[in-house]
Amino acid sequence: METESPTISRRVGYLCGWPDPVAQLLQDLYPVTPTEFVQLGDAKSESGDLDEILVLSQAYALACFDDLEAQSCPCRILVRREDMFADSSIWHTGIELLAEVLRLSKKEDLTLMALTKDAAAELAELMHLPVAVIDQLPVLPNPRPLVKVRRGADETSFLFSEAEGDQVVRRAQLEIFNWVRLRRLADLRAADPDDIDMHDLTKFARGEHDVKVSIRAERMCILCVVPNGVGLGHITRMIAISKAIQDEIDARIVFWSFSRAAEILIAAGYEVFLRQNVMHLAAHPPDWRLWETKEFASVIRKLEPSVVCYDGGTFDMFIIDALRSVGCGRCGVAWIRRGMLHQEADAQMLEAEQYCDVVVEPGDLAVEMDMGPTRMRKAQKRGFSERIVAPPVTLKPYLSSYSRSVARRKLGLGFGRCCLVSLGGAFGNWDILRQEIIDQAAEQRVKLIWAQSPLAGSSKDDLAGATIRRFYPLSRYMAAFDGMISAAGYNSYHELILGYDGPVLFTPTNNVRLDDQSARASYAGQQGWAWVVHADAIEDQAHVIAEFMATVRKGRYLASRPSPVQGAPEIAKKIVSVADKYI
Amino acid sequence: MMHVPPRSNIAPAPSLLRRLARENLQMGLRLAQLEFAEMKKELSDPALFDLMIDFPKTETLDAPFLPSIFDQYSGQYLPKLNVPLGRISWCADPNSLPVIGIHCRDQRSSILQSALLDLLKTNHANPFARFVFVCESIRPIPFLGRYGFAYEYLGRQPFEMVSDRLVARYDIVEIRDLIDGRVLNSFNLRSSD
């Protein structure tokens, strides 16, 4: 078992309303002593092993003052100045009441503090009691856009310098951010001159001390979230990117996997938290999300990842909710989002860009055909995110491939021409296509090997007598085959076009839930890289299958395909650069 | 102006509802029978749990421990999650069935498959519980997932360390060993009692 983050040496309980940026900022307050922050529901229970209790507003202190007095550990009360919604007379009454009960209190280690020097001076004068300034946060050196924060605003606009140097107006919902993260992304200022508490908060968030002390585990950790996709695309892509990250730096990579194919991740050498999604459990979505949020947050606190990488179509909010939790702010977000969605796909999914530090699109060789929202539309709210398009990502460069003889021996294929058939299977009625393939293969004396997903069950009756192989990953075994028939999902397509030189026939699965495989396959056909058969007109395309099988029979190689390119290293560098922001 | 049909025209007739309920009963049972037959066939395949995953020699790491969330105030009042009955069984009110944790040790596939068949055969014939399979090995997970079961992958983490979580998350009443059926842990905490 790998060493976890530094051993906790201090436990601090805190009482506050939610969401309170000060509670989030506590994570940056103790840069030297590894501290665990424990949210308290009330101050009634015995503090036990807490070293200290922080009460983050006078309202909370007054509400449970008797219980605070009974605690054996020191208690510090953060007194806050007026915010824009406060009733001035009520605020003054609260301050006077707190001063009065403190004067009567016998608890000696009950002290007051404020967020800034100005606040401490004003409050000390009003309360006639000493008010200390809370420890100040370290200053962050990197240049950041100036963002004016207005309490309760639905969204905020600000000027953002893009990588190309252009200044653009960006929009974001600031409430989705943990302030530990937000202060690394933006130079925060209060928008409303009457919101004195916000002035104090933003000044506190900007930091004062020029200290740079890391208390993270020495080895960087990256937490990868993979959904339960239709196939193995998300997992395959994330393994390639993880391998590239580990080529770049010595990183611990841990997966939060909803995919039942998690055994593949374990076999690839990664630690896995295996989860079930809301549909697996047929659970009430808010209940399920609450569990995911709490447990994902607990893992972030324990592992202290520098980046959460998500490979998938749409963010589930549990990731963002967890990152807002106290102790989870020192972590960036990278979204690995492939393009080639259907033209009619919902562009609303783009709005999740505002949660991210970087949105990385693994490039698609057929990008010219991409009419989907990731290419044709822009998110309304992009927050602080950067968007890059990398070259295509494939797993093959990270695995040694078998020679033809070894691959054939391992798969028990014997001699003669062999063609692998991998139709994807999840969607579409391929009965006619399957029969046509069988007939043409028989004609050309080509042996068909039917690939079965590791996620699928045992052989089905309708394939009885056929040669079925279940293996992963395909890229190690490519040399065994004289031809390939495949669906045109991102990974299969790019593994074959960039890593295989035998004849390929694409049989795209056209389901609106998936990427636009038809467009991708058609592009390969136009470029002369592969043959293509579309599901809606198989009867008219028998000659294509015949031509393909004849080429397999002849054992021809196709020299016209593009040279191998590899996007995973570029993506890995970008992820590591995000991680550097959160040290 | 939008035409709104009178209420009598949009309310389903009682006879229709009765027919749908009858069909649901018949189809639910029939589907469960078909799924069970398919599952039985799968369990007879000695290679069922062998996925033929082939990476160059790599160190395999254990499942990391999930930190407890119950020492945080916000982790104390979490709702119970649904536990599906699984597609091989059917009953009119699956929520009335207790939830039992089934501890699957890391055993040879043939032993696991045989024990799974025994257990699931019984639950198919006469559903008596909903199961959460608590697995030391990840090998049975794709199979369990295909048939709609709840599962937890523990790796080498002793199940005693996570039993509080299983109770809080699924409301399980006991944990039994898959192979010999022994009760390993029992909890008398059902919220519905």
Image: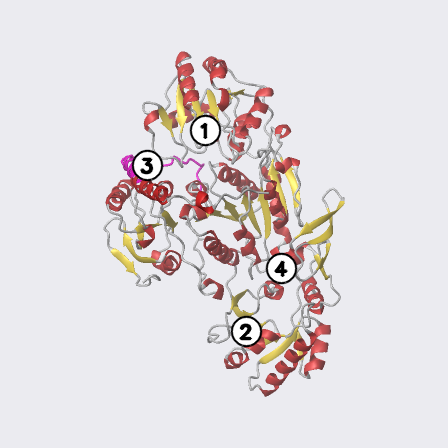
In-front residue for pair A425/A447: A425
Badge nearest the viewer, 1 or 3: 1
Is circle 1 on the same chain as circle 3? no
Is the residue under label 3 in contact with that under label 1 (CB below 8 Å)? no
Visible in this render: residue A269? Answer: yes
First of labels 4, 1 by sequence position:
4
Question: Which color mode does the image show?
Answer: secondary structure
Say which chain tag 4 marks.
A
Q: Given the image, on which type of amino acid does mark 1 rest? A: Gly
Q: How far apart are marks 2 and 1 (CA)?
A: 60 Å
Q: Given the image, on which type of amino acid does mark 2 rest? A: Ile
Residue B40: in magenta span: yes
Q: Position of residue A14 (x, y in %)?
A: 55, 70
Segment colored magenta: B30-58
First of labels 2, 4 by sequence position:
2
Is circle 2 on the same chain as circle 3? no
Say which chain tag 3 marks.
B
Q: Given the image, on which type of amino acid does mark 4 rest? A: Val
Q: How far apart are marks 2 and 4 (CA)?
A: 20 Å
Residue A381: in magenta span: no
Callout 4 secondary element: helix
In-front residue for pair A252/B69: B69
> Would you call the spot at circle 1 few (<14 residues within 10 Å), some (14-19), or many (20 or more)?
some
Q: Position of residue A161 (x, y in %)?
A: 74, 47
